[in-house]
Image (cartoon, helix red, strand yellow):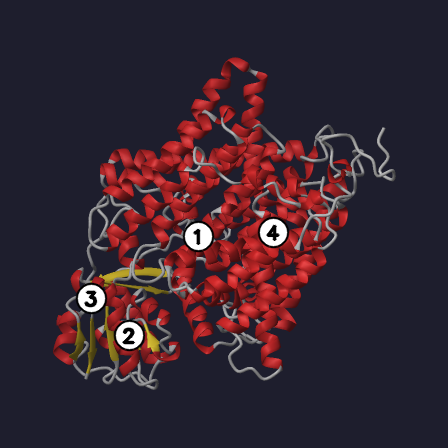
């Protein structure tokens, strides 16, 4: 035996090799000093795209690695849960950004959200973390070779580039061949990896999930000259205002968006640190961050089941239409979902030392709560069910009454939500509105049940807007303006029969029998998946022999199932947090009992294993080909904007360069005290350009237009002759009144496809 005190050693053995890993100290200055210096150097050359790419990678990796080292999180745990790195980096960036903003205002800096203050704040924060990381054992060093993809495993990262090329070609008016190839590559990769999962490494499967996730989202987020989606237009307006003003304040009464650092301080900080425009932060960088969400689900599922079924659990999230189409259009939820998944990973990994586990849980819970209100409310409901069910079960089974990490998550989430949206930002209007709506109209059970069977209603989405005819809309909106908006002075002859509103043709062709069959099949598969996942979660969560590691996730699944059911039957709840978005969050935990049950079926009946694998691959394919729009592209019936420049989604959310130019011109020339009109989706472009919302009206009809107003007409209004509005929770698609506008207004701006009318 060799004595450490003797100073002797055997040939070929050095003293550091003889010291146990938990006693050796990891170098800090040598590891992090050069990257922090490189961060400053690269910012000088940030106008070069390669430098911007490196800056993005460094900003999303370096702060998180420092925080994890400072907390003494074992490197093997980070390698097992790679989502820890971007989640921790987002936490550090948010804290440093808020500190610079609020601290700068305190000492009298008028524009603290600028490049130099943000860089100084991040460097100081990282310096503090470096000091805290001194003395960390060498076991805290991340084994990057276990995480990083090699050349032979990195090929799935080419799929997002193909999807981006397809989106850009569509933006330039070309066909959808490249976009369709990218969509097919996503499907082929998922099915191939599922079938061959037992022969593939963990890193390879994780890279495949990330590549497909990012491709699915970039196919939507990169469409158009502005952001793609409804909510994200308002988010971009708030972000752009933050970037322009260079300052953000805590008080936001009645302004839920403005109170969220995830769409104000954080993206503005990323913009100033990397040089990437604020628009591309939302279109390009945020999807690249939230693409880690399925990877995180895969990571903690691996501890509960085999690789194939952990991959299936994560894939079930990606194939949902809402994952690609809606999540990139909700920047605040993108960041909150990353924190939510990282929180689940921390709570799962009982190997983490107690204090790092509690601190990370609290930090990610706080990040989730301040990033998005609906995500944290849904998570609180899930964890409350877990706490209650585990407490009750402990009286009948020999199990702990509570799990400490889950208790920390619940307490911090509740406290953070109450304090942040209450006394700190005063922005709890969304919650008070929900309470008020519930008090006046109840839970509005099956609001659109009339005319449908209960089965049809249950298979449908409560967030689908019912339609209204143009004639009925004209009658109702005229009465509304006469009683509620008497300041509007219409033209005397606006009520002539020649100017009556007409219904517009449906932009999407009717679906064929095959597409209807596939649509019904995928709805049935999704419903069966929810029922199976729910039944297994209830059985295993309350079963005596369930292992302590798995029980909390089954109990979380029970809470998620209850909340999904509440959203399904209640129009009031569905309005607050729509079902597709809630489904994505819920299946981070519900996917576990679903995949686990499939694994058990193959184990118990070996002769069925290959059939189960084939059946799951077929189910994933059926859901994905419909959700991605491939059925519409192949068999007709219309498709979403990821594969088309026409159709309902494209006309609503794709903003062209001429549309932006016309909006810019009008915002510059229209006085702030004048009324401005645009249809529902044209108004989004004006909002994104920071148009004054108080004077913006969305009823473009002859009898509601003011004599001295401005009218903004998009390319859809003029070239497709369609306008859209939501009135009394009904969607109206009507013929844009071009004839009335030409006879009563003058065209003061035109670029061939978009125009501005004024007298």
> Quadrant location of the N terminus?
top right
Residue 457 drawn above or below residue 50 = above
Hey, which quadrant is residue 488 in on the image?
Answer: bottom left
65 relative position to 231: left or right: right
Q: Residue 736's mark?
A: 3
Question: Decide: marks 3, 2 in contact (CB < 8 A)?
Answer: no
**Front disc: 4 or 1:** 1
Q: Nearer the viewer, residue 439 or 345?
A: 345
Q: Nearer the viewer, residue 656 or 539?
A: 656
Q: Who comes first in sequence, dot 2 or dot 1? A: 1
Q: Residue 664's mark?
A: 2
Instruction: Estimate the spatial distance between the alpha carbons at disc 2 and disc 4, rounded to whole Å.
Output: 40 Å
Which residue in the structure is indicated by mark 1?
Answer: 287
Packing grade of label 3 (10 A; few <14, some 14-19, many >=20) is many
Residue 552 drawn above or below residue 704 = above
In this rendering, does residue 377 appear at all? Answer: no
Local secondary structure at mark 4? helix
Packing grade of label 1 (10 A; few <14, some 14-19, many >=20) is many
Which residue in the structure is indicated by mark 4?
Answer: 379
The percent position of residue 361, horizontal first and vertical second, equals: 67, 51
């Amino acid at each position: 035996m060799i004595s450490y005190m003797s100073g002797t050693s055997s040939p070929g053995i050095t003293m550091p090799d003889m010291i146990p890993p938990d006693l050796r100290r990891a170098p800090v200055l040598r590891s992090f000093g050069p990257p922090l210096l490189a961060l400053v150097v690269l910012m000088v050359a940030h106008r070069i795209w390669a430098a911007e790419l490196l800056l993005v990678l460094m900003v999303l990796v370096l702060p998180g690695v420092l925080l994890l080292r400072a907390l003494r999180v074992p490197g093997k745990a980070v390698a097992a849960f790679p989502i820890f790195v971007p989640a921790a980096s987002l936490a550090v960036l948010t804290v440093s950004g808020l500190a610079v903003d609020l601290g700068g205002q305190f000492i009298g800096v008028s524009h603290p959200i600028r490049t130099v203050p943000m860089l100084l704040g991040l460097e100081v924060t990282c310096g503090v973390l470096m000091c805290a990381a001194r003395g960390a054992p060498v076991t805290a060093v991340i084994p990057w070779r276990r995480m990083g993809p090699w050349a032979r495993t990195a090929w799935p990262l080419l799929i997002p580039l193909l999807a981006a090329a397809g989106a850009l070609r569509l933006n330039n008016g070309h066909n959808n061949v490249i976009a369709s190839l990218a969509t097919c590559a996503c499907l082929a990769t998922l099915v191939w990896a599922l079938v061959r999962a037992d022969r593939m490494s963990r890193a390879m499967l994780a890279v495949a999930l990330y590549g497909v996730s990012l491709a699915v989202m970039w196919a939507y987020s990169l469409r158009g000259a502005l952001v793609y989606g409804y909510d994200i237009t308002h988010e971009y307006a708030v972000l752009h205002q933050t970037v322009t003003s260079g300052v953000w304040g805590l008080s936001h009464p009645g302004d839920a968006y403005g109170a969220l650092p995830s769409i104000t301080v954080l993206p503005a900080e990323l913009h100033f640190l990397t040089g990437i425009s604020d628009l591309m932060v939302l279109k390009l960088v945020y999807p690249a961050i939230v693409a880690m969400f399925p990877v995180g689900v895969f990571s903690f599922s691996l501890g509960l089941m085999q690789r194939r079924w952990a991959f299936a659990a994560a894939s079930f999230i990606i194939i949902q239409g809402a994952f690609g189409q809606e999540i990139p259009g909700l920047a605040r939820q993108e960041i909150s979902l990353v924190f939510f998944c990282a929180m689940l990973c921390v709570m799962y990994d009982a190997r983490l030392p107690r204090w790092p586990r509690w601190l990370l849980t609290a930090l990610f819970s706080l990040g989730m709560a301040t990033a998005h209100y609906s995500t944290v409310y849904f998570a609180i409901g899930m964890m409350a069910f877990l706490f209650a069910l585990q407490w009750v079960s402990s009286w009948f089974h020999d199990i702990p009454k509570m799990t400490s990490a889950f208790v920390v998550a619940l307490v911090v989430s509740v406290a953070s939500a109450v304090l942040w949206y209450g006394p700190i930002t005063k922005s709890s209007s969304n919650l008070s509105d929900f309470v008020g709506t519930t008090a006046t109209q109840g839970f509005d059970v099956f609001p659109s049940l009339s005319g449908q069977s209960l089965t049809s209603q249950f298979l449908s989405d409560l967030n689908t807007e019912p339609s209204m005819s143009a004639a009925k809309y004209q009658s109702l909106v005229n009465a509304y303006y006469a009683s509620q908006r008497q300041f509007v002075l219409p033209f005397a002859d606006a009520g002539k029969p020649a100017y009556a509103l007409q219904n517009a043709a449906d932009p999407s062709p009717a679906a064929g029998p095959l597409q209807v069959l596939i649509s019904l099949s995928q709805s049935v598969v999704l419903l069966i998946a929810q029922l199976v996942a729910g039944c297994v979660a209830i059985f295993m969560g309350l079963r005596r022999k369930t292992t302590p590691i798995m029980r909390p996730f089954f109990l979380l699944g029970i809470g998620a199932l209850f909340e999904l059911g509440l959203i399904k039957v209640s129009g009031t709840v569905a309005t607050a947090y729509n079902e597709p978005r809630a489904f994505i969050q819920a299946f981070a935990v519900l996917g576990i009992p679903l995949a686990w049950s499939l694994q058990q079926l193959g184990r118990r009946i070996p002769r069925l294993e290959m059939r189960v694998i084939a059946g799951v691959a077929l189910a994933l394919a059926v859901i994905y080909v419909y959700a991605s729009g491939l059925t519409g592209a192949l068999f007709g019936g219309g498709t979403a904007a990821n594969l088309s420049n026409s159709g309902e989604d494209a006309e609503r959310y794709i903003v062209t360069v001429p549309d932006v130019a016309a909006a810019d011109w009008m915002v510059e020339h229209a006085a702030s005290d004048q009324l401005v009109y645009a249809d529902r989706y044209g108004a989004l472009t004006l909002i994104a350009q920071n148009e004054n919302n108080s004077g913006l009206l969305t009823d473009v009809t002859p009898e509601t237009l003011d004599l001295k107003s401005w009218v903004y007409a998009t390319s859809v209004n003029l070239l497709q002759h369609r306008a859209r509005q939501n009135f009394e929770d009904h969607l109206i698609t009507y013929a844009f009144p071009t004839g009335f506008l030409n006879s009563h207004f003058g065209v003061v701006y035109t670029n061939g496809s978009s125009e501005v009318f004024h007298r």
